[in-house]
Image: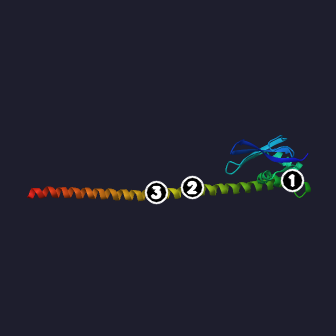
Amino acid sequence: MATKIRLQRGGRKGYAFYSIVIADARAPRDGRFTEKIGTYNPNTNPATVDLNFDRALYWVECGAQPTDTVRNILGHEGVYLMKHLHGGVKKGAFDEATAQKRFDAWKADKQKGLDAVRESEAKAKKEAIAKELEAEKKINAEIAKKVAEKKAAAEAAKAEAAAAEAATEEAPAEA
């Protein structure tokens, strides 16, 4: 029996949500499966993967063939690295503790990279908000300047009208 690791679609229309399953290669995409080993949600940014690492590693070592997308997911989660390290342990290149140490170092390095990306995205978002705020303040200052000029012009017109009225009142009184 040829075993595949594939995605099984779920979720509503326009909002796909996938289960990562072990299935017979002849079974349809959303049909019968042997075991569910995780979920994949591509709708979040970054995509959310919840994977039973030990079972995924077991099935990969048993020879289950993943689809392209699942291969990428397993690679990002480190299943293939651990398979490679287990191969080194079997050959006697190093022991299990060294393999685990190397995997933990890889995982920490990957996490640090992800944190740096999230931090840079947050910083860029914060800078964009600050730039928008600065532009809005500039526009508001220009509007306030125009309003002040209009008020000054209205006050000047009022003063001229009052002066002209006073002048017209004085002129008939002199006659």
- Callout 3: 10 Å neighbours few (<14), some, many (20+)? few
Q: Is residue 14 left or right of residue 37?
A: left
Of residues 123 and 29, the one drawn nearer to the viewer in this rendering? 29
Image mark for residue 17? none
Q: Earlier in the sequence, mark 1 or mark 2?
A: 1
Q: Is residue 46 left or right of residue 66?
A: left
Amino acid marked by disc 2: Lys
For the point 82% across and 54% down, the residue is 80
Residue 35: x, y in percent?
83, 41
Q: CA distance from mark 3 to mark 1?
A: 60 Å
Give the position of the N terminus as an image quadrant: top right
For the point 67% across and 54% down, the residue is 115
Closer to viewer: mark 1 or mark 2: 2
Residue 20: x, y in percent?
79, 45
Q: Farthest residue to the left: give it.
A: 175
Which residue does the numbered mark 1 point to in the structure image?
A: 86
Q: CA distance from mark 1 to mark 2?
A: 44 Å
For the point 85% across and 47% down, the residue is 4
Of residues 138 and 122, the one drawn nearer to the viewer in this rendering? 138
Q: Earlier in the sequence, mark 3 or mark 2?
A: 2
Image mark for residue 126? 2
Q: Quadrant of residue 10?
A: top right
Amino acid marked by disc 1: His
Q: Mark 1: which secondary structure?
A: helix
Give the position of the C terminus as an image quadrant: bottom left
